[in-house]
Image (spheres, helix red, strand yellow):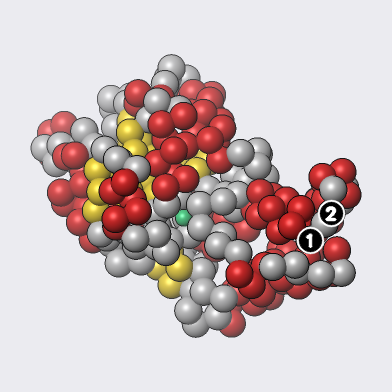
Amino acid sequence: MPSPSRLILFDIDGTLLTAGGAPRRAFRNALIAHFGTNGDEARTDFSGKTDPQIVYEIMRRAGFDDERIGTGMAELFEHYLVGLERELPQDASHRLHPGAAEIVEILASDSRVVLGLVTGNVERGARLKLERFDLWRRFPVGAFGSDDPDRDRLPQIAIDRARRLTGRPFTGADAVVIGDSPADVRCARAAGAMAVAVASGLPTRAELAACEPDVLIDSLEEWPDLLPAIGLSPDPALAGYS
Ligand SMILES: [Mg+2]
């Protein structure tokens, strides 16, 4: 069995799936419960941001100082997660994107690959969103909004976790970040990783192209072309499928 040589890191929202309205409703309710207001949440674009970053941005604009915002952030997210767990199963618009299940299955069975997540979701939020589709177990490593509010630091955290998991000295050059927003491309660059942009979320293809990702696709359904582009030749012998 060859040791894995590629670390493939997926964003969740807008990339693997669309979570529908449940996360925003749960977020709104938690903000109101915790701060007495949801500020300009309804007009705030969450795309590419970490969950704590969203709280800081909205509440700063609502006039709260960082000390007040940071105090009890854990309780705010407890509230959010209770709401998310209650609301997600009832939300018919929570759906996997075309090609997502296929590419995850293929990569999970490729002995050259360690699969991971780089997402702004707090870890338990990521888990709730993916468990619905039985995908959480496919990602042995991950870095989350609960690890750091700064998305640019998340790929390196995932790389460090992959090193500890496998004993292989993964670096940014071994990693690929796949996401739907300019923030995903930026965080890939911050870690020296390859950036794959998928125009399946809110940011447009033109906005993504302006960030100059290494690969730009419209959908994960393009996985047959994507795999060789990220250094994973479909050669069955190389892939260890024999
Ligand atoms: Mg996203």
Residue drawn 75% across and 67% down? 39
Q: Nearer the viewer, residue 188 or 115?
A: 188
Q: Kindly state the secondary structure of the residue where label 1 is placed.
A: loop
Which of 55 and 138 lies nearest the eye of the viewer?
A: 55
Q: Which residue shows up at 42% across the image and 35% down it?
A: 188
Q: Is residue 114 visible?
A: no
Q: Which mark is residue 62?
A: 1
The quadrant of the picture occupied by the N terminus is top left
The vertical placement of 74 against 170, above or below, is below
**Displayed quadrant of residue 147:** top right
Image quadrant holding the C terminus, namely: top left
Q: What amino acid is at disc 2?
A: Phe
Q: With respect to residue 221, does 89 lie above or below? A: below
Helix, strand or loop at mark 2: loop
x then y, percent, for residue 136 = 50, 54
Mark 2 is surrounded, within 10 Å at the Cα level, by few (under 14), some (14 to 19) or many (20 or more) other residues, namely some
Using the rendered image of the protein, determine whether residue 52 is visible from the camera's viewpoint: yes
Question: Please, what is the three-letter code of the amino acid marked with disc 1?
Answer: Ala
Residue found at x 76% / y 53%: 60
> As drawn, which residue projects farthest toward the top?
169
Q: Are marks 1 and 2 in contact (CB under 8 Å)?
A: yes
For residue 125, which quarter of the picture?
bottom right
Residue 230 lies left or right of residue 42; in this view the side is: left
Q: Residues within 10 Å of mark 1 (few under 14, many from 20)?
A: some
**Total marks drawn?**
2
Residue named by callout 2: 64
Horizontal and vertical percent position of residue 160: 53, 25
Determine the residue positioned at 55% across, 80% down: 91
The percent coordinates of residue 214 (x first, y second) are: 26, 38
Whole-percent x and y of residue 33? 85, 69
